Amino acid sequence: MKLIVTIVDDQDVDKLITALNAQRIGVTRVSSTGGLLNPGSSTLMIGTAEANIPGVMKMIADVAAVRPAVVPYAHSSSMAFTNLVEIEVGGFTTFVLDVDHFEQV
């Protein structure tokens, strides 16, 4: 048994949970914070058999891929004007942990 802990952008989390549930893979969502320009992130805890790890990792990579986005950038000066700047959003951080003991009540 393995525990996958993955941190994904809030824009991707609902799509990822839906994709995991479609494959009958259970997932628990925990709200988390962090990042400079992105609005938020969520931490997902996914318990699964070791044989499912490659498929789950591919699903995460497909749904939460890094992509370009255009966001407003305000200059701090006496003149207020806004430019648009292209940044990369999305992406994920994932940890795969061994599970010594599991109980479900």
Image (cartoon, helix red, strand yellow):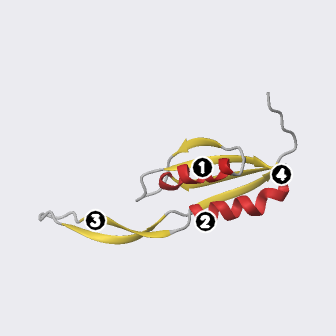
Q: Separation of disc 1 and disc 2 at Cα? A: 13 Å
Disc 2 and disc 4 in contact, CB within 8 angstroms = no
Instruction: Tell which circle, 2 or 4, labels the residue nearer the N-terminal end.
Output: 4
**As shown in the figure, which amino acid type bears the numbered disc 3?**
Tyr
Q: Would you name the residue on which mark 1 appears?
A: 18
| SS under mark 1 | helix
Identify the residue shown where x is 66% and y is 61%. 59
Query: Mark 1 is on which residue type?
Result: Thr
Label 2 and label 4: CA atoms lie apart by 20 Å
- The residue tagged 3 is 73
- The CA distance from mark 4 to mark 3 is 45 Å
| Foreground of the two, 44 or 79 | 44
**Disc 4 and disc 3 in contact, CB within 8 angstroms:** no
Disc 2 designates what residue? 62
- Mark 3, Cα crowd under 10 Å, few <14 / some 14-19 / many 20+, is few
Name the residue tied to disc 4.
49
